[in-house]
Image (cartoon, rainbow, N blue to C red):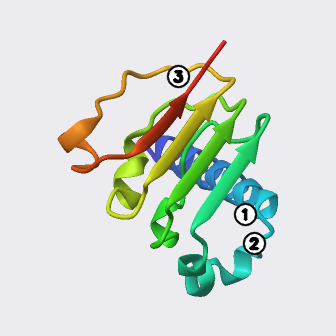
């Protein structure tokens, strides 16, 4: 029983570490200091990520005024985290990468018109 608890704790720690690295990659790609993300995240209205490094959309909640998100060459697994920015997002680009999960647009996520640029391999 103790071994199982230890394994679960290690798995959770590894997952948190990986997610932190993804968020750190997103921030550094946009010239954002990750240490100031909680206080300054709302200053950013556009984010972009090019050619790998972001399989998960993580930390979008910090970007309270995000209007435009451009993702090129990412192996995004799930777009559900877009709900965190659905009130402000006006433009979404997902290009040069496979989408591995179906997407439901319209009132389900945004409830307003959003410019979408979706292209793939």
Residue 76's image quarter? top right
Q: Which mark is residue 99?
A: 3
Position of residue 78 measured from the top left corner of the image (x, y, whole percent): 46, 33
Between residue 24 and residue 113, name the one nearer to us. Answer: 113
In the image, what residue occupies the spot 62% across and 18% down? 120
In the image, what residue occupies the spot 44% across and 38% down? 79
Image position of 56 with respect to 117: above or below:
below
The residue that mark 1 highlights is 27
Q: Secondary structure at mark 2?
A: loop
Q: Secondary structure at mark 3?
A: loop
Q: Residue furthest top?
A: 121
The residue that mark 2 highlights is 32
Q: Secondary structure at mark 1?
A: helix
Q: Alpha carbon of mark 1 to alpha carbon of mark 2: how far?
A: 5 Å
Residue density around tag 2, few if under 14, some if 14–19, many if 20 or more, within 10 Å: some
Position of residue 29 measured from the top left corner of the image (x, y, whole percent): 80, 57
**Can residue 17 be spotted in the picture?**
no
**Can residue 95 be spotted in the picture?**
yes
Position of residue 116 measured from the top left corner of the image (x, y, whole percent): 47, 37
In the image, what residue occupies the spot 45% across and 66% down? 61
């Amino acid at each position: 029983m103790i071994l199982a608890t230890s394994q679960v704790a290690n798995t959770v720690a590894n997952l948190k570490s990986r997610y932190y690295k993804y968020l750190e990659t997103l921030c550094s790609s946009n010239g954002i200091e990750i240490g100031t993300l909680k206080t300054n995240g709302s200053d950013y209205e556009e984010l972009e990520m090019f050619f790998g490094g972001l399989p998960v959309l993580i930390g979008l909640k910090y970007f309270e005024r995000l209007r435009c998100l451009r993702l090129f060459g990412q192996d995004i697994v799930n777009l559900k985290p877009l709900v965190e920015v659905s009130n402000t997002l006006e433009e979404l680009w997902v290009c040069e990468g496979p989408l591995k999960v179906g997407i439901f647009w319209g009132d389900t996520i945004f409830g307003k018109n959003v410019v979408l640029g979706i292209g793939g391999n």
